[in-house]
């Protein structure tokens, strides 16, 4: 009875591990590569926003369990300090991909909000479900096999929803095309390399299911949501 669900669950974990591995490898390699121009992550993101006429979008340095994302409700792009001040190809890829979400409008914006809801489920629902099911097993003597089946069903459903909304991430990368055509017109090799990195960034959140315990438990630590404006930050020495 449990063999098939367990097999499906391990396939799901393999997908998450694949996404995590390819993103980690890209970040490790691209962190050793200088960006095509001297702009930092926050500066190149600001250039893109200006190019799109998105002058009201604020870039904020943010250090916490979760960072490097665009919040449509506050119209803010939250970047970690390393990405905001970094001048490596990896910093550009992360900053530009997240900045591209700010260009979404209409149905695209609705899809972005739905995508972000799914990502939150990936980060918190599996661990919450595990805690609740363990409590049910101890307090209510809920059968372990049904608890396991329930947890597997929740994880698989969330992963499928994650995969089903992945087009939002690739659409964000397409928003960058005209800007990159202009900014890297004389550096086609750098443009090609950056697009490769952007593709890896687009799939990074498939791995969030495996990282659910980290997000679930560490997000409650005081001070993990601290943020400050990158526009007022001094440049790194």
Image (spheres, helix red, strand yellow):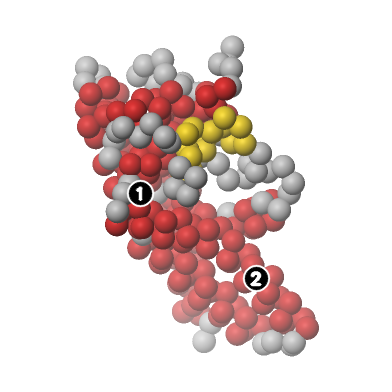
The residue that label 1 is drawn on is 169
Which residue is at 69% across, 70% downward? 131
Residue 68 in the figure: left or right of residue 64: left
Which residue is at 68% across, 43% downward? 224
Q: What whole-number distance in Å separates the C-alpha atoms at marks 1 and 2?
A: 29 Å
Which residue is at 27% across, 22% downward? 183
View extreme (front): residue? 56
Which residue is at 31% across, 49% downward? 105
**Mark 2 or mark 1, which is nearer the start of the sequence?**
2
Mark 2 residue element? helix
- For discs 1 and 2, the disc positioned in front in the rendered view: 1
Q: Nearer the viewer, residue 143 or 106?
A: 106
View extreme (top): residue? 237
Give the number of marks.
Answer: 2
Residue 54 in the figure: left or right of residue 222: left
Residue 195, compared with residue 205, is above or below; it is above
Where is residue 81 drawn, in percent x and y? 57, 29
Q: Are marks 1 and 2 in contact (CB under 8 Å)?
A: no
Residue neighbourhood size for the residue with mark 1, other residues' Cα within 10 Å, grouped as few (<14), some (14–19), many (≥20)? many
Query: For the C terminus, which image quadrant?
Result: top right
Mark 1 residue element? helix
Say which quarter of the image contains residue 180: top left
Q: Can residue 31 be seen in this snapshot?
A: no
Where is residue 31 drawn, in percent x and y? 47, 27
View extreme (right): residue? 139
Where is residue 63 drawn, in percent x and y? 62, 36
Q: Which mark is residue 130?
A: 2
Q: Can residue 116 be seen in this snapshot?
A: yes
Residue 175 in the figure: left or right of residue 10: left
Q: Which mark is residue 144?
A: none
């Amino acid at each position: 009875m449990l063999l098939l669900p367990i097999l499906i669950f391990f396939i799901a974990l393999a997908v998450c591990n694949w996404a995590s591995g390819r993103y980690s490898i890209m970040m490790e390699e691209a962190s050793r590569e200088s960006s095509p121009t001297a702009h930092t992550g926050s500066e190149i993101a600001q250039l893109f926003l200006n190019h799109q006429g998105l002058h009201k979008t604020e870039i904020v340095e943010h250090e916490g369990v979760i960072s490097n994302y665009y919040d449509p409700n506050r119209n803010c792009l939250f970047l970690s300090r390393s990405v905001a001040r970094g001048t490596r190809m990896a910093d550009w890829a992360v900053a530009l991909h997240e900045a591209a979400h700010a260009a979404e409008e209409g149905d695209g914006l609705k899809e972005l909000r739905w995508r972000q809801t799914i990502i939150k489920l990936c980060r918190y629902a599996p661990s919450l479900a595990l805690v609740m099911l363990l409590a049910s097993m101890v307090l209510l003597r809920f059968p372990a096999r049904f608890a396991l089946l329930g947890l597997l069903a929740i994880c698989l459903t969330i992963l499928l929803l994650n995969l089903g909304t992945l087009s939002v991430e690739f659409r964000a990368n397409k928003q960058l095309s005209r800007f990159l055509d202009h900014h890297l017109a004389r550096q086609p090799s750098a443009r090609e390399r950056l697009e490769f990195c952007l593709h890896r960034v687009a799939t990074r959140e498939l791995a969030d299911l495996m990282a659910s315990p980290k997000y679930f438990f560490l997000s409650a630590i005081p001070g993990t949501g601290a943020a400050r404006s990158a526009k007022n930050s001094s440049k790194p020495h």
